[in-house]
Image: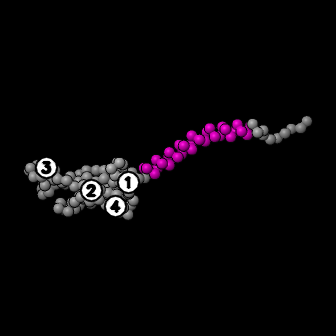
């Protein structure tokens, strides 16, 4: 009597098929996770740059708050657009309140077709007294 210790070709093929059936979905999930991590990194950096630019706008004097398009903002690969417009103030003057809108995009992105990664609006009043 001879006892053979080994696997047959059929057992090997079945093992490879079972491992493949399990590995393909796991590989896709891992790929999606990596993409989500990169995207969330972009959103977090964009939010922080947005907050930084809003704080800079709030600290400027009223007359120095102007519309600007900044590329590679603060050394990061993001573009920041600050749009300033006048709102009708309580006294009826069209120049007593400025509406400041800041949008952050990936550098070089087509801004007309892709939306901003982050955006915010604030209002800054002239001659406010308490």
Q: Please say if the residues under marks 1 and 2 sit with CB atoms less than 8 Å apart.
A: no
Residue carrying label 2: 82
Q: Is residue 18 left or right of residue 79?
A: right
State the CA–CA distance, disc 2 to disc 3: 19 Å
Indicate whether 91 appears above or below 73: above
Residue carrying label 4: 71
State the CA–CA distance, disc 2 to disc 4: 11 Å
Mark 4 secondary-structure assignment:
loop
Q: Earlier in the sequence, mark 4 or mark 3?
A: 4
State the CA–CA distance, disc 4 to disc 3: 31 Å
Report the span colored magenta.
11-40
State the CA–CA distance, disc 1 to disc 2: 16 Å
In the image, what residue occupies the spot 31% across and 60% down? Answer: 70
Mark 2 secondary-structure assignment:
strand
Is residue 108 rendered magenta in the image? Answer: no
**Disc nearest the viewer among 1 and 3:** 1
What is the x, y in percent for residue 111? 34, 52
Q: Is residue 45 left or right of residue 120?
A: right
Indicate whether 29 appears above or below 72: above
Residue carrying label 3: 88
What is the x, y in percent for residue 16? 68, 40
Q: Earlier in the sequence, mark 2 or mark 4?
A: 4
State the CA–CA distance, disc 4 to disc 1: 11 Å
Task: Look at the image and tell me in which quarter the C terminus lies.
Answer: bottom left
- The answer to whether any part of residue 44 appears in the image is no
What is the x, y in percent for residue 109? 38, 54
**Disc nearest the viewer among 4 and 3:** 4
Residue carrying label 1: 109
Mark 1 secondary-structure assignment:
loop
Q: Earlier in the sequence, mark 2 or mark 3?
A: 2
Q: Earlier in the sequence, mark 1 or mark 2?
A: 2
Q: Please say if the residues under marks 4 and 3 sit with CB atoms less than 8 Å apart.
A: no
């Amino acid at each position: 009597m001879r006892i053979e210790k080994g696997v047959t070709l059929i057992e090997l093929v079945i093992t490879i098929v079972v491992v493949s059936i399990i590995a393909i979905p796991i590989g896709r999930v891992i790929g999606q996770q990596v993409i989500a991590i990169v995207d969330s990194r972009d959103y977090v950096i964009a939010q922080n740059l947005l907050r930084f630019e809003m704080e800079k706008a709030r600290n400027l004097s009223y007359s120095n708050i102007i519309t600007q398009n900044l590329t590679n903002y603060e050394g990061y690969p993001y573009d920041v657009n600050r749009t300033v417009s006048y709102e009708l103030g309580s006294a009826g003057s069209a120049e007593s309140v400025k509406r400041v809108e800041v949008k952050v995009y990936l550098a070089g992105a087509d801004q007309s077709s892709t939306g901003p990664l982050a955006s915010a609006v604030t209002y800054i009043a002239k001659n406010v007294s308490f």
